[in-house]
Image: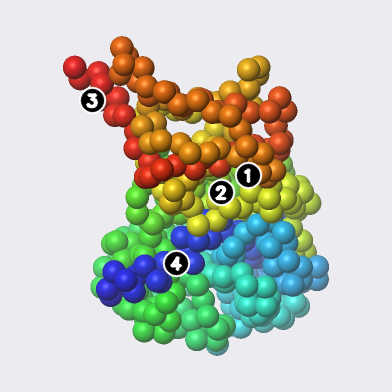
Amino acid sequence: MGEHTQDNKMAWFRQARYGIFIHWGLYAQLGGFWKGERVSAFDGAEWIMRDGQIPVEEYRQIAKEFNPVDFDAEEIVDRVVQYGGKYLCFTAKHHDGFAMYDSKVSDYNIMHTPFGRDVVKELAEACQKRGIVFCLYYSQMQDWEDPDGDGNTWDYDKEKKDFQAYFYRKARPQVEELLTNYGKIGMIWFDTPYDMPRDLSDELAQLVHDLQPECLISGRIGYGLGDFREMNDNNIPHNAFMEDWESPMTLNNTWGYSRVDHHWKSASQVVRMLVNVVGKGGNLLLNIGPDGRGQIPQESHEILLQVGKFLEKNGESIYGAIPMADMPYENQWGGCTGKPGRFYMHVLDYPDEPYEIRIYNLKTKVKRVTLLETGEELKFVQLYEIARDEYRFRAFFPEKPVNALDTVAVVETEGPLEYHDLRTIYAK
């Protein structure tokens, strides 16, 4: 595939910069508890079947009671829009093997529950109406319900597993269903490839290319076959990463719904993560976990609404931003995002009097500085100190922040950003 075509394929991803992840399945019904006891695990509430070593036949019984009557795809996608997300990634099948759509490959799916509705279909249609890019998560290797899928060693003998049989019987045909029956899919988010054979990973990637050539493939297909790098869960690279990448993050400490995990990140923390990720050239995929009735936890909703309101006025500094070169010093006041001919100072920790923000060793000449929300022009000083061989830039802000979450200033420059390399200075 030519570079120009790949750039076109990646265009929506590079423009979006912020997506909403939704982990939802049978595990939401349990909320981290099994038979009245909390299953404590490092992995998260969605791993309860494995961490609790719950027998398949017992776990399957949850499907007979699964009836999330409050689920409303239209409302959920409306909320994604309100939150400022540009794409939605939904768990079509997680590691427990249960499909949240009408699968003809396996009857272990949502159509065989009291609810009996195709959640993937409803979300796909709602996203299409609202211009949200619809993406699907599919666990291609782990499947704790299938005797040949990876992961379940308490019900099935690991030595007797035939993964290739599982791949052709379930994984491959289910991916084919998802890419055939639900319209345009922006991305398929594979996960936990572990030691999946290279030839099967190649075949899975080729299937995606054949069925939907414009559909992105996440890096967790393995072997470098993805269209972008998927960072470790809840981790952000230390330095700018000049290739396409994404950081999947949780709003609390788990991915699936938990009755007891109320360790919510604040709206301020989410904005800080967003600035950090986007400034380094990546996308933030932020997860929420609806409960067993299909409702987004109210705490999640309120936090993400605040983020959405910030983005309504300051989205220019996030959407379509390009990677910033690493600055010589850490900015204790916040961080920066960039676009050609300008960069944005995100003042997350507002300064005391004299209300100034400094950037050292910025060589590029600054033309103008304004507040993004109000358009107010800010005074600035830029100079070079010969004795210390040091460039200094200072911008003077109002007494009070324009936005409690993040006061954003637009810095217009005469050319591409260039910094004086500290290694050059101190190597003398």
Q: Earlier in the sequence, mark 4 or mark 1?
A: 4
Please provide percent x and percent y for residue 160: 35, 69
Q: Residue furthest left?
A: 428
The residue that disc 2 covers is 317
Q: Amino acid at mark 1?
A: Leu
The residue that disc 1 covers is 372
Q: Nearer the viewer, mark 4 or mark 1?
A: 1
Q: Amino acid at mark 2?
A: Ser
Q: Nearer the viewer, residue 58 or 81?
A: 81
Q: Amino acid at mark 4?
A: Ala
Please provide percent x and percent y for residue 261: 69, 43
Q: Is residue 256 visible?
A: no
Query: What distance separates the C-alpha of mark 3 from that of mark 2?
Result: 31 Å
Q: Earlier in the sequence, mark 3 or mark 2?
A: 2
The residue that disc 4 covers is 11
Query: What distance separates the C-alpha of mark 2 from that of mark 1?
Result: 8 Å
Q: Residues within 10 Å of mark 1 (few under 14, many from 20)?
A: many
The residue that disc 3 covers is 424
Please provide percent x and percent y for residue 91: 57, 66
Query: What distance separates the C-alpha of mark 3 from that of mark 4?
Result: 36 Å
Q: Residues within 10 Å of mark 3 (few under 14, many from 20)?
A: few
Q: Evaluate if marks 3 and 2 touch, with contact meaning CB atoms under 8 Å apart.
A: no
